[in-house]
Image (cartoon, rainbow, N blue to C red):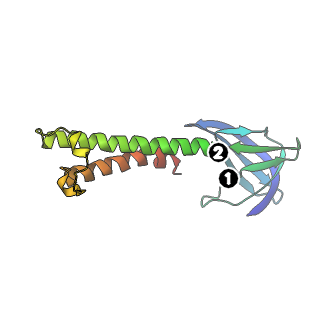
């Protein structure tokens, strides 16, 4: 990590999906022009062109700095990004798992109703008295497809939007 201080130039604020993106450049004390990007649900603080700032962070592989907090020396304040809290993330995670399981079960019920029209799809989920899953009437291909659909839905809802 490097401690960078300098003057802010070219401040832009954009909305991307549910995030606010604050982009600007810093002319360092050494004369280098450094691109900076702050991203979060909201940005707290004020930053204008010409402000003297100091920050402590490293660069990504493209040379852009992504600090969480910047100290604005001109206004004697800080600029920071806020992301969703831990509990809201956990609730969304649990909802995603439940939705994925429900989708997988529904897929399995639909597939099994086409393959075995004489049996009720609900009766396939009751465990046999012997405890043997092979005798319960569940088709392995339908079960594998249901699990695959559940995993796909889980990936699309929870993991893919968070990849950057």
- How far apart are the two marked residues, 2 and 1, measured between alpha carbons? 8 Å
Q: Secondary structure at mark 2?
A: strand
Q: Is residue 44 left or right of residue 89?
A: right
Image position of 42 with respect to 68: above or below: above
The picture places residue 91, in percent across and down from the top left corner, at 54, 41
- Nearest the viewer among 164 and 93 is 93
Residue at x 17% of width, y 39% of height: 113
Mark 1 neighbour class, 10 Å CA radius: few under 14, some 14 to 19, many 20 or more: some
Query: Of all residues shown, which one is farthest toward the left?
Result: 118
Residue at x 69% of width, y 51% of height: 35
Image position of 43 with respect to 26: above or below: above
Mark 2 and mark 1 in contact? Answer it, CB < 8 Å.
yes
Instruction: Tally the marks.
Output: 2
Place residue 40 in its image quadrant.
Answer: top right
Q: Secondary structure at mark 1?
A: loop
Image position of 2 with respect to 119: above or below: below
Mark 2 neighbour class, 10 Å CA radius: few under 14, some 14 to 19, many 20 or more: many
Q: Is residue 158 left or right of residue 89?
A: left
The picture places residue 62, in percent across and down from the top left corner, at 60, 58
- Nearest the viewer among 91 and 56 is 91
- Nearest the viewer among 103 and 160 is 103
The picture places residue 69, in percent across and down from the top left corner, at 76, 49
Residue picked out by circle 1 = 66
Residue at x 25% of width, y 51% of height: 143
Query: Of all residues shown, which one is farthest toward the bottom?
Result: 1
Q: Earlier in the sequence, mark 2 or mark 1?
A: 2
Residue picked out by circle 2 = 39
The picture places residue 41, in percent across and down from the top left corner, at 64, 39
- Disc assigned to residue 21: none
């Amino acid at each position: 990590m490097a401690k960078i201080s300098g003057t802010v130039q070219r401040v832009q604020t954009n909305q991307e999906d549910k995030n606010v993106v604050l982009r600007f450049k810093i002319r360092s004390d050494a004369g280098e022009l450094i691109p900076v990007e702050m991203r979060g649900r909201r940005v707290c603080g004020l930053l204008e062109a010409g402000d003297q700032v100091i920050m402590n962070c490293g660069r990504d592989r493209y040379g852009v700095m992504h600090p969480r907090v910047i100290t604005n020396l001109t206004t004697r304040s800080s600029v920071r990004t806020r992301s969703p809290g831990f509990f809201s993330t956990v609730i969304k995670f649990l909802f995603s798992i439940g939705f994925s399981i429900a989708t997988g079960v529904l897929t399995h019920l639909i597939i099994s109703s086409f393959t075995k029209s004489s049996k009720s799809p609900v009766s396939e989920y009751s465990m046999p008295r012997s405890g043997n899953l092979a005798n319960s009437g569940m088709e392995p291909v339908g079960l594998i497809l249901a699990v695959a659909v559940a995993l796909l839905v889980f990936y699309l809802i929870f993991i893919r939007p968070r990849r950057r």
